[in-house]
Image (tube, rainbow, N blue to C red):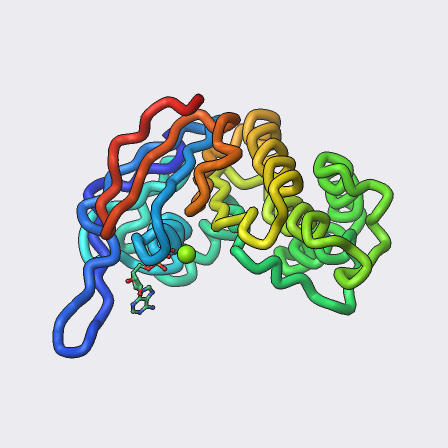
Amino acid sequence: MSLNLTDVTLTYPDGTGRLTALDHVTLDVPRGSITAVVGPSGSGKSSLLAVAATLVTPDAGTVTVDGTPTTGLTRGRLTDLRRNTIGIVFQQPNLLPALTAAEQLQVMAHLDGRSPAGARARARDLLDAVGLADQAGRRPHQLSGGQRQRVNIARALMNDPAVLLVDEPTSALDHGRGAAVIDLLSRLTRQRGTATVLVTHDRTHLTVVDRIAEVHDGCLSAPVPAG
Ligand code: ADP
Ligand code: MG
């Protein structure tokens, strides 16, 4: 198992009380497989990803990433864990306007202190893998929404993560481009062996994922095979 959440509960302050965003959530995602988490807006999808990404510490329960239990790790150790084993695709690409597609990827390796030559080669390989080899020199404003989302996905793979967490990647795309992005995620998951969680409020395009789990009011159902 490459990503495991066991009995995770997360609450937020809410006026005088607490709002339960995740209610005893358990989820196992093996490497090389993609689990979709579907649920309406406000059901806890992004909270689940934030906990899985170790960006938010739950009130109770455990998160194990690529065999490493995260409970009690210092902030520094968590940062290292994220850097080395987790790829995150946020809902908004957050690409840097001044950088080319290739540079958006290379900057990740630069932050990690890796060699520039290796980073350039890896960026080329990943842009090729997401079908953007010929767009490597373009800046975000010269790319379509779908292409920007592909750069976003390629960037999340720069550290060769064991775990890939993706938040509503199709929300800003039309039907065809949305389907292409989910196909791409499915293919990359198998090729690169990531344990992928794909969060979405939209059930279309989910025929290519392995399993689907539903979240309602912070409660996650057991995943069922898709298709
Ligand atoms: P989804 O991604 O499914 O739309 P979220 O995980 O963002 O759902 O939110 C789940 C619930 O937690 C919602 O009721 C939301 O308002 C609440 N929530 C999310 N983030 C915060 C926060 N930082 N502080 C307080 N409440 C939050
Ligand atoms: Mg959300």
Q: Is residue 197 left or right of residue 187?
A: left
Relative to 212, is 152 on the left or the right? Answer: right
Who is closer to the viewer here, 126 or 89?
89
Query: Seen in the image, is 102 located left or right of residue 209?
Result: right
All told, the count of numbered labels is 0
Looking at this rendering, what residue extends furthest in the left direction?
Answer: 17
In the rendered image, residue 178, in percent from the top left (x then y), is placed at 60, 42
Residue 38 occupies which quadrant of the picture?
top left
At horizontal 61% and vertical 41% (from top left) the residue drawn is 175
Residue beneath the point at 36% across and 55% down: 41
| Image quadrant, ligand 1 | bottom left
Residue 11, image quadrant: bottom left
Residue that lies at the very extreme toward the bottom in this rendered image: 15
Taking depth in this image into account, of 218 and 127 the one nearest to the observer is 218
Left or right side of 102 for 178: left
Q: Is residue 223 above or below residue 68?
A: above
* Quarter that holds the C terminus: top left
- x and y, in percent, of residue 127 in the image: 75, 42
Compared with 172, 209 (above or below) is above
- Say above or below: 173 vs 35: below
At x 47%, y 45%, the residue is: 165
Looking at the image, which residue is at 62% across and 56% down?
112
- Quadrant that contains the N terminus: top left
Question: Which x, y percent locates residue 27?
Answer: 30, 36
Q: Position of residue 182 (x, y in %)?
A: 57, 36
